[in-house]
Image: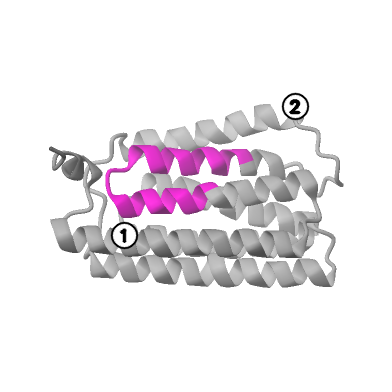
Amino acid sequence: MSQLADFLLVLMVLANLAMLGTKALHNSVRLLALQGAALGALVPLMAGGDVQSYLLAAGVVALKGAVYPWVLQRVQRKVRGEEEDEPLVGYTASFFAGILALTVGFLLAPRLAPPGPEVTALALPVALSTIMSGLTLTVTRRLALSQVFGYVVLENGIFLFALAIVGELPLLLEMGGLLEVFFAVFVMGIAVDRISREFLTTDVDALGQLRG
């Protein structure tokens, strides 16, 4: 089970690095789906494998692995966005920032002593690096849709961090959190669509020039 968990965590890291290094938005949607499915599969491995953990895993896979990517793909098609034009930080630099985030995660993880059973030593470093990768995507991308991708990655990292620290999580609490994130992604998707229709762009720098 530990080897399977390590494999899924490695998939999450690879998804982070691929999203940081790609400019194709449809690829980012697919990578989000892969990361969401991997995160869902990790839940029963890290939370005890009881009925509650499998129900939570099903909810995570359904929302993060299917519903979120579907919503974001529809928005991407409506705004006709294929690529991120010129991010604030280049793709190569962003990729190396992801590697740096993983290194920092490994350095910080030993300082955080989880009270629950440790399933794999990779859990905390991957969680921390995913949080930092999500922040990097949110801060360095110009398109509003790309920033939404960063928000979802950030939330994935926070979810994994909580799972690694606490272990078994209350089902109602986690499902409530998942629904809140779903509504946030749904609302942001609608907002990006409306902004694109109104201003014919989702570049946040171009929108900033409209003030005044």
For marks 1 and 2, give the one nearer the viewer: 1
Reply yes or no: does residue 145 show up in magenta.
yes
Residue for point 50% across, 50% down:
153
Q: Residue furthest front?
A: 212
Q: Quadrant of residue 43?
A: bottom right
Which of 42/78 is in front?
78
Q: Which dot marks residue 36?
A: none
First reached walking from the N terminus: tag 1 or tag 2? 2
Q: Measured from the top left, where is residue 92 in percent x and y?
A: 35, 37
Magenta-colored span = 128-154
Q: Is residue 109 left or right of residue 153?
A: right
Residue 150 shows up from this direction: yes
Reply yes or no: does residue 76 show up in magenta.
no
Crowding at mark 2 (Cα within 10 Å: few <14, some 14-19, many 20+): few
Q: Main secondary structure of the magenta part?
A: helix
Q: Which residue is mark 1?
A: 191
Query: What colour scheme was applied to this rendering of the protein?
Result: one colour
Q: Measured from the top left, where is residue 79 in percent x and y?
A: 23, 64
Q: Quadrant of residue 169?
A: bottom right
Residue for point 19% across, 45% down:
207
Crowding at mark 1 (Cα within 10 Å: few <14, some 14-19, many 20+): some
Q: Secondary structure at mark 1?
A: helix
Residue 120 shows up from this direction: no
Q: Which dot marks residue 111?
A: 2
Residue for point 58% across, 72% down:
62
Q: Would you place residue 106 above or below residue 171 in this image? A: above
Amino acid carrying label 1: it is: Ala
Which of 42/147 is in front?
147
- The CA span between labels 1 and 2 is 40 Å
Amino acid carrying label 2: it is: Arg
